[in-house]
Image: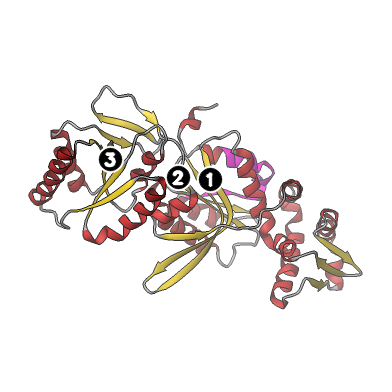
Amino acid sequence: MITHVGIIDQDPVRLITPLLDHGVPANKMIFIGTEAQREQYDRLSSILTPRNIDAEFFVIPDSINITCIRQCLNELAEKLKQSQSEVWFNASCGLRHRLLSAYEVFRTFHWPIYVIEPFSDEMCWLYPSDREQQQVEDRIQLTDYLTIFGARCELPEQLVPESLSDQLRELGQRWASSALELGPGLATLNYLATTCRKEQCLTVTLSEKQQGYRELGMLLADLEETGLATYKDGSLTFKHEEARRFANGEWLENLVHSTVRAIQSDLPTIQDHSVGVQVYRKIGEREVRNELDVATVVNNKLHIIECKTKGMRDDGDDTLYKLESLRDLLGGLQARAMLVSFRPLRHHDLVRAQDLGLAIIGPDQLGELEQHLHQWLKGAGGWAHNIA
């Protein structure tokens, strides 16, 4: 029987990921934390219990009294020694004074000690030194990841048929490749679809001026050819609500998500992905909802992609700060985020995104979306980082 032990902190993902690796023996996990971290423990144990891994919470005092902390950890170690279980200490997480105290105690008992290196996601052995490093399998799922950070999520139930998905991706790629040319037309299409949403209908009448827009006419012809809408005598009718949402900007989300799905066959570190993820977080007594346009877990790190089909002249800073905030709140220190924008970005927005550590794909790069996404996702590290 193998019992793992680790210290809870604000970014405890690396306490969970090795336990989900089929090549790492794990029967039980003991989480060390203060009483104030019990809610975090409950979330972590809820991930392990369905996977037949027992979880236990060992409470230490919330103080910087090293003598007191070491005394508590010695009591835990003596208890583990009597249980005759083989003990592995995961030294990846924990405030410095707690982590060093625990390391000292567990090293005294000559138990194996390892850390999960953040970028490569390898299990590195501090003791004994003759054990080989190994890559941690990428098995944590999107719902598990968000649970760790106190969020619950709803994934979309309705999946687009594969034949239509390929067709929609091809259409989206065609629009994206002509982003600079089709920009004004797509802005008008977005406005028309928004009008339908506000009026709760699927039909909208174009003004005489709108009927003369060449780029808009090209887009409407594409929608008709795909069977998503009909256009006759200045009247545009969407086939269903999904088609209206597609024209209202979801075409870009759909394109980005289907591109991530296509990249997965070449990049095995992509372990889970979804589009239109509804995320709920408790703030005091109220529950706050956010939507992640595209979310994926790559090399055990959360990746959030915001897709923007409207210009950012009025809300550029808000969009970027919100994306940064969601990345940090939902994904911890290793999470990454990107903005994919169909409309040109101001120099100010590009500089601000760089300051916030956000990746950007702009309209002039959308024609090579797959190449840019592949490069960014590969940057999450792991085994695939070494693949040419």
Q: Is residue 226 above or below residue 131?
A: below
Mark 2 vs 3, N-terminal side: 3
User: Would residue 93 be visible to someone looking at this image?
Assistant: no
Mark 3 vs 1, N-terminal side: 3
Residue drawn at x 13%, y 34% is 108
> Is residue 215 covered in magenta?
no
Mark 3, other Cα within 10 Å: few <14 / some 14–19 / many ≥20: many
Question: Which residue is denoted by mark 1 in the rendering?
Answer: 272
Q: Is residue 303 above or below residue 114?
A: below
> Is residue 359 covered in magenta?
yes
Question: Which residue is denoted by mark 3 in the rendering?
Answer: 4
CA–CA distance between discs 1 and 2? Answer: 8 Å
Q: In this view of the protein, which residue sits in the foreground, 245 or 217?
A: 245
The amino acid pointed to by label 3 is His
Q: Residue 242: x, y in percent?
A: 71, 62
Please state if 77 lies on the left or on the right of 321 as rendered. left
Q: Residue 34: x, y in percent?
A: 21, 57
Label for residue 140?
A: 2
Q: Are marks 1 and 2 in contact (CB under 8 Å)?
A: yes
